[in-house]
Image (cartoon, rainbow, N blue to C red):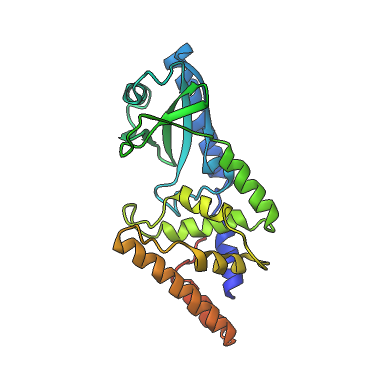
Amino acid sequence: MSVQSHLSAVSSNLVLTTSETSAIQTSISTLSMRLNSHFGSVINEHFKFGSSNRGTILPRSADGKSDVDYMIVFDEDTSTKPQTLLSRLRRFVETKYSTSDFRQSSPTIILSLNHIHFELVPAVRSTGGLQIPAPSSDYIEWMHTYPYTADKAISDHNANNKFQSKPLVRLLKFWNAQADPYSRPFSSFELEQFVTGKYFYLCTNIKDYFYDAVKSLPDGWDRAASKRDRISRLKEIAAKAQQLERDDMPYSAETEIKKAIPVFA
């Protein structure tokens, strides 16, 4: 084994199995049917978006917070308060998923099923396109969203980088998920944006991409000390593994990199 073979194996295993994909699709079909039954013409459309579309979602066994983003576009405009639509979704879940756990995580409703979480996102259409509720920390109520822009960005970046971008995103998300949800240095979407916004020079395999990404990963100066420490520790591990490889100690390098990216099968 080596750092390259280890990272390649882990990134390949960090994909949904056929059974997981099938179970999610069944849940989406049920969700779609129940939304139509409950809301009727009150909603214009609803659809899956996010990392589950982009092929960068992690299995729930790798990340307990892994979820499927699902947008529900109401036949309303921005004069409607976001909380009004969130309350409607909450009542929908209470009615149609009475035995399942759910909670509001502003500005979404998180529905927890046995095999996956659904993050239900209310939206409205405006002149500029789709808008969703802004985070509670913002001073605005609604903000524009472009759900398919990120899909194209990661798809194009992946094609232009030897199809290593998506495996790299999954590895970085897996490292990020080793911390508890409140101590994760980055959000999953931040890591995707970081990768798709980065130029990789002279990288040929997943090991090269991983080392290059870690080296230029933001230090997190604007984050809590515990998060900065995790980022710093990752950089130290990657740098040490690289040095061990240069010293012709591949097995020691693999042992070192496993401190950040453990075995996942």
Residue 109 in percent (x, y) is at: 36, 32
Quadrant in the rendering for residue 175: bottom left
Q: Is residue 250 left or right of residue 97?
A: right
> Which residue occupies 38% across, 23% down?
96
Residue 52 in percent (x, y) is at: 54, 42
> Looking at the image, which is closer to me, 111 or 18?
111
> Which residue occupies 50% across, 24% down?
32
> Looking at the image, which is closer to me, 130 or 46?
130
Q: Is residue 235 left or right of residue 184?
A: right
Q: Is residue 66 above or below residue 93?
A: below
Q: Is residue 65 visible?
A: yes
Q: Residue furthest top?
A: 41
> Looking at the image, which is closer to me, 227 or 70?
227
> Which residue occupies 62% across, 62% down?
200
Residue 4 in percent (x, y) is at: 61, 71
Q: Is residue 263 above or below residue 72?
A: below
Q: Residue furthest bottom?
A: 247
Q: Quadrant of the N terminus?
A: bottom right
Quadrant in the rendering for residue 160: bottom right
Q: Is residue 31 left or right of residue 224?
A: right
Q: Is residue 11 left or right of residue 224?
A: right
